[in-house]
Image (tube, rainbow, N blue to C red):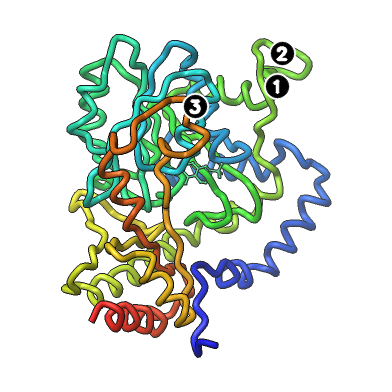
Amino acid sequence: MPEHKIPYLNLHHVNSKLLGPFQELTAQVFQNSNYINGPFCAGFERNFAAYSGTAYCSGVSNGLDALVLSLKALGIGVGDEVIVPAHTYIATWLAVTHVGATIVPVDCELDTYTIDTSLIEEKITANTKCIIAVHLYGQACDMGAIMVIAQRHNLYVVEDNAQAHGAEFKGQKTGSFGHINGTSFYPTKNLGALGDAGAITTNDAALYNKVQHLKNYGAKVKNEHAIIGANNRLDELQAAFLNLKLPLLTAWNDERIGLANQYNSMLSGIEGVILPATNPLCKHVYHIYIIRVDNRDALQQHLAAKGIETLMHYPTPVYRQQAYAHVNIERGTYPNADTVAETCLSLPLYPGLSTADVEYIAGVIKEFTA
Ligand SMILES: Cc1ncc(COP(=O)(O)O)c(C=O)c1O
């Protein structure tokens, strides 16, 4: 048995400290008996809009629904093409598929792992309607280049901000650049609920109102259903928990950044280990701390033998998932996405991880590569 036991993620660190307030909030929601679209939802929406620097926020059921609702609000559907990064979590692609639009993937950069903006324009056709900008692993993509391209070709921009709460591009928060933006508060995210939750953020009143109706059975007022909607509402209890956690997000992100800096300095200069690159225009909030090594599987096994749990984000590019076999993309079409999938390894990083833990993990990696 290894002496150390370091899980990939330990949510208990942040959530256990809040048990008392969580219980108090649960009692309040219980007392209010206003379980759907209640005051905690309204309060969180106000606070998250202010945090994001947008005029509006609409709480929704999860991150995938946030992206689907964003595309629906923009009127994107069958016959439209949407540019997505080849390297992302499958939810980005699924949102496009669920509205019936066509996915147009673009490969990622090999240093930041975000979409390679120099490859976007060659994919634009008369049917292109939108670019989905994914701020992967906690780092903003080049929003300057994306907004210029979108303007030049009259395209919508939707940010997928699921992995980057608090990240910035040129001092502006992610989730505030696009026409409408989706995020997830899945429990492992930088701001995580205690169940499924998500939100859209926008400065556009019409798009906000459309989402408000779409997520609530298409009803503008009770019993009047103007459009075909669904039930994609944010749960009142999750909104209460998120509202409690939101003021703590900056300190948790700072802790993540500190731990990432420690990894960077302890792992720098090791031959064969590629560290995550930070675009100097970005504030990276390290949702995931990823290294790349050629013998990734052997390193993962070595770390496991030493009690260190690691994950891969993601071991199979979306275009090679069985779910997307029907799009018939030949293997090798997105070489950088393939390379990341084959070499990536996500190291433990979360608020509450100790500097001694990082030292131990870095030491084990050094020992492996020596
Ligand atoms: C980049 C990205 N987009 C979208 C999602 C979807 O979020 P959810 O799991 O809340 O549906 C996730 C996370 O799961 C994600 O990492």
Q: Nearer the viewer, mark 3 or mark 2?
A: 3
Image coordinates of residue 101 in percent, x first then y, are: 46, 18
Q: Quadrant of the C terminus?
A: bottom left
With respect to residue 102, does 159 lie above or below? below
Q: Which residue is mark 2?
A: 225
Q: Name the spot of residue 271 as percent of width and height, x first.
A: 17, 71
Residue 328: x and y in percent read 41, 26
For image coordinates 32% across by 68% down, the residue present is 260
Image height of 88 relative to 217, above or below? below
Residue named by callout 1: 217
Q: Residue at x 22, y 34 (%)?
A: 117
- Residue 70 is labelled as 3
SS at badge 1: loop
Which quadrant holds residue 275?
Answer: bottom left
How far is the residue under mark 3 from the one under mark 2?
19 Å
* Left or right: where 2 falls relative to 339: right
